[in-house]
Amino acid sequence: MNLCIIDSWKNILQKEFEKPYFKRLTDFVKLEYKNSKCFPKESDIFAAFNSCSFENLKVVIIGQDPYHGENQANGLCFSVQDGIKHPPSLVNIFKEIATDIGKEIPVSGDLSHWAQQGVLLLNATLTVRESEAGSHQNQGWEEFTDAVIAEISEEKENVVFLLWGKFAEKKGSSINTDKHRVLKAPHPSPLGAWRGWFGSKHFSKTNAFLKNTHKEIIQW
């Protein structure tokens, strides 16, 4: 596995890279990419970090697994490669943005412009085997991304955490809510969207909080 990650994150996470679980995880991922088709491509495994430096981080969105279809995953949760049809959850994200802040639904489902503004689009598991959802779960990624969330909570202040669905809520259990703003809503998938995702207004609420803490708002 190519541990190509920018210095601002490498300095924060170096101790995780040296732990036995991460060495086992690295061996597992290397073998998987050698023997099976996996996503995202190896150079994009740490794209969430490389697209959003630790210093610039203002918002965290937590996903579960990368997309497991051909040419979909680009290393950012909920995001797809440019030119790929929007998956159902992303469709509902864009619909909520449209009603919340009045922005037209974009043609591209690539969310890298969010990341570049300080949104960490973090999947709990950073890799997956083609057409096998959850195939790289319970191999160490969850421990690694738990450590990422704990470091953000400890080292930063006034970060907005967007927790969509029960999985993300559990994943965010270590967040210090005295220091950070946590917004919860049902998952934007078709199963959860009509149970409170639509109308949650997380995008305008995030920007209101950023404005109140003297940070630049996100151009969603």
Image (cartoon, grey):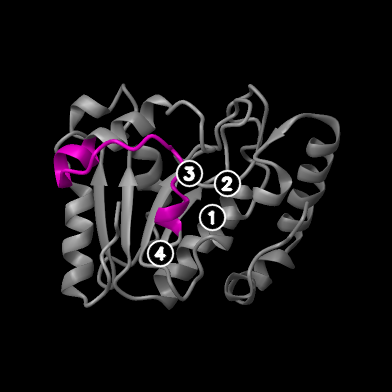
Mark 3 burial class by Cα count in 10 Å: few <14, some 14-19, many 20+? many
- Point out residue 137 in the picture as x, y percentages from the top left corner: 61, 37
Q: Which residues are magenta?
A: 96-115
First of labels 4, 2 by sequence position: 2
Q: Earlier in the sequence, mark 4 or mark 3?
A: 3
Percent x, y of residue 62: 42, 48
Q: Which residue is mark 1?
A: 48
Frontmost residue, 213 versus 15: 213
Pointers 2 and 1 in contact (CB under 8 A)? yes
The vertical placement of 209 against 111, above or below, is below
Residue annotated with mark 2: 75
Where 206 falls versus 216 (above or below)? above
- Taking the magenta stretch, the answer to whether it contains residue 80 is no
Q: What residue is drawn where x is 76% and y is 44%? A: 29
Determine the residue positioned at 47% across, 51% down: 112
At a point 51% along the width and 38% down the height, the residue shown is 82
The kind of secondary structure element at disc 2 is loop
| Nearer-N-terminus badge (2/1) | 1
Disc 2 and disc 1: Cα gap in Å? 6 Å
> Which x, y percent locates residue 153?
40, 69
* Res. 19 image quadrant: bottom right
* Disc 1 residue type (three-letter): Ala
Amino acid type of the residue that numbered disc 3 sits on in the rendered structure:
Cys
Disc 4 marks a residue whose amino acid type is Gly
**Does the residue at mark 1 contact the one at mark 3 (Cβ under 8 Å)?**
yes
Residue 102 shown left or right of residue 63 in the figure: left
